[in-house]
Image: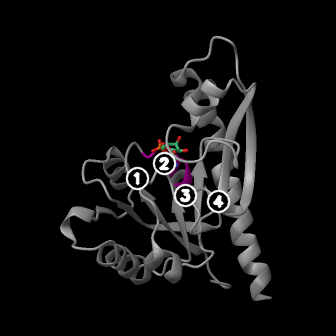
């Protein structure tokens, strides 16, 4: 990795707008990496089509085809290793990462979450924020560990919440910020890999 570009693996479950931004940022050399592979747990994810249209290998690994989470994640690990992936980026990957992936890519898996962690972990973070009545929401990129949305934070940004925001409008505003911070966070993590190699 020290002499050439890093290889990213992206895990998705659906739309893939963060994945799209990451691929484009790599292709524009705004991130010093190439996206080697996109994997979705959901065979119907639109992000798979989008990734293919951008020239990136993208495929589904369906957990339903495996007896255990270990076997499912082991297949993902094999694909990531076969593609020499250095850093795994979760981009709307709506499954809890288990031990098999965590062990193989220790401290090398990051995630984007649509809240200012440690507030509003888990599902429907934007809805949770509105229900709580917070005046500022936002998004976080963080390392993934065995605590759900609990790993160390890499970057965050804030979004003011208006009185008339709905889950949909707030999600849209947060998503715009997600698209800004995720490429920056990846660059930051890759720079930290370089430093630890020196
Ligand atoms: C994004 O808002 C992301 O933060 C969220 O899912 C959306 C995926 O959108 N992720 C989570 O809630 C993870 N807990 P995308 O597929 O268009 O990137």
Q: Position of residue 62 (x, y in %)?
A: 25, 62
Q: Position of residue 147 (x, y in %)?
A: 59, 63
- Secondary structure found at label 1: loop
- Secondary structure found at label 2: helix
Would you say residue 145 sits in the magenta stretch? no
Q: Residue furthest bottom?
A: 198
Q: Quadrant of the N terminus?
A: bottom right
Instruction: Judge from the rendering whether residue 76 lies leftward or rightward of residue 187; answer left or right.
Output: left
First reached walking from the N terminus: tag 2 or tag 4 = 2
- Secondary structure found at label 4: loop
Disc 3: CA contacts within 10 A as few (<14), some (14-19) or many (>=20): some
Marks 2/1: CA–CA distance: 8 Å
First reached walking from the N terminus: tag 1 or tag 3 = 3
- Where are the magenta residues, as a range? 16-22
1 and 3 marks in contact (CB < 8 Å): yes
Residue picked out by circle 3: 27
Disc 4: CA contacts within 10 A as few (<14), some (14-19) or many (>=20): some
Residue picked out by circle 2: 20
């Amino acid at each position: 990795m020290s002499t050439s570009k890093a290889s990213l693996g992206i895990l998705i479950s659906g739309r893939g707008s963060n994945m799209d931004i990451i691929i484009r940022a790599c292709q524009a050399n705004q991130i010093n990496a190439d996206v080697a592979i996109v994997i979705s747990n959901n065979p119907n994810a639109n992000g798979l089509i989008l990734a293919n249209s951008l020239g990136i290998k993208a495929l589904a690994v369906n957990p339903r085809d495996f007896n255990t989470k270990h076997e499912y994640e082991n297949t993902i690990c094999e694909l990531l290793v076969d593609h020499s992936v250095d850093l795994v980026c979760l981009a709307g990957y709506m499954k809890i990462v288990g031990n098999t992936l965590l062990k193989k890519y220790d401290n090398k898996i990051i995630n984007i979450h649509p809240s200012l962690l440690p507030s509003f972990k888990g599902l429907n973070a934007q809805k949770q924020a509105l229900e709580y009545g917070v005046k500022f929401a936002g998004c976080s990129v963080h390392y993934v560990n065995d605590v759900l949305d609990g790993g160390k934070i890499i970057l965050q940004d804030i979004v003011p919440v208006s009185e008339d925001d709905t889950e949909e409008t707030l999600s849209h505003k947060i998503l715009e910020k997600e698209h800004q911070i995720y490429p920056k966070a990846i660059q930051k993590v890759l720079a930290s890999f370089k430093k630890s190699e020196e």
